[in-house]
Image (cartoon, grey):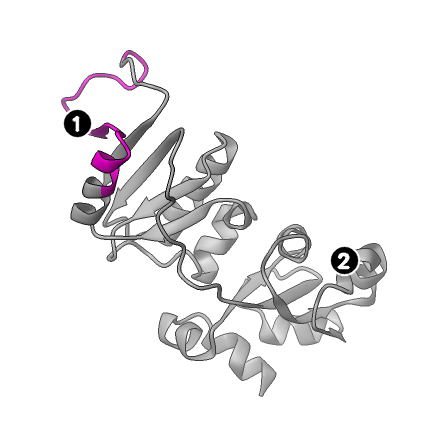
Amino acid sequence: NKIKLIKSLAQKKFRQNEQLFLVEGDKMVAEVLNSGFRVTDLFATPEFLNAHKPLTGRAENFHEANIKEIKKASLLKTPQNCLALCRLQPPAELPAHFLGFALYLDGIQDPGNLGTIVRTCDWFGMDYLFCSPDTADVFSPKVIQASMGSFCRVKTVYIPFDELAEWAEQNQTPVYGTFLKGESLYDAHLPGKALVVLGN
């Protein structure tokens, strides 16, 4: 039953029904155990459990498993020593006060691209990533894998652009669009506080 549940989390409707998402890989499971996300179940080999003893107690339930059992449940071609089921948090909301720089993703469908963008936002110290409702789900296993744990630190807010533009105006945050024939981002003089729209 647990394997069936884990496999089902590849699909958004089951993630929403169960209010769970899947995290795989030693580094990312350690990151999520060290974050504000609730880990309901941790499945790990004795090697992982021994190497991360202080963290494993943060999981509500942990189950010792061998690598064959993890392979049966995993969505990866080459699974590592653990996987974790985590509780979805309530949708992130717009911040009342915004300082800094953020992206708005308009219709980014590829999960790998979204995960890479989340990782880039984290690298540049962005606290927020805004997405159109038709952008890929940040809790998709492929997005989680590509983000390399950065989803733990970057708050992703799904919101129609009209609502975000109104919020940006209230917060005196200028909005820039990216265009093929636009000025080079490296030459543009952007203010310290700005929102950049990136399309599919």
Q: Residue 6 location, x and y as percent?
A: 54, 76
Magenta-span inclusion, residue 186: yes
User: Residue drawn at (44%, 36%), measured in percent from left and top?
Assistant: 121
Judged from this view, the residue extending furthest toward the bottom is: 1
User: What residue span does the magenta drawing correspond to?
Assistant: 167-187
Discs 1, 2 touching: Cβ within 8 Å: no
Residue 161 makes an appearance in the image: yes
User: Residue drawn at (55%, 50%), measured in percent from left and top?
Assistant: 152
Q: Amino acid at mark 1?
A: Leu
Name the quadrant containing residue 167.
top left
Closer to the camera: disc 1 or disc 2?
Answer: 2
Instruction: Indicate the secondary structure of the residue bearing disc 2.
Output: helix
Using a 10 Å C-alpha cutoff, classify the residue at mark 1 as few (fewer than 14 neighbours), some (14 to 19) or many (20 or more).
few
Predominant secondary structure, magenta span: loop
Name the quadrant containing residue 46.
bottom right
Q: In the rendered image of this protein, does residue 165 appear above or below residue 80?
A: above
From the viewer's side, name the closer residue of 145 and 165. Answer: 165
From the viewer's side, name the closer residue of 164 and 62. Answer: 164
Residue under label 2, please give it: 55
Instruction: Indicate the secondary structure of the residue bearing disc 1.
Output: loop
Q: Residue 87 location, x and y as percent?
A: 54, 68
Using a 10 Å C-alpha cutoff, classify the residue at mark 2 as few (fewer than 14 neighbours), some (14 to 19) or many (20 or more).
some
Relative horizontal placement of residue 14, taking residue 183 as reference (left or right): right
Q: Amino acid at mark 2?
A: Leu
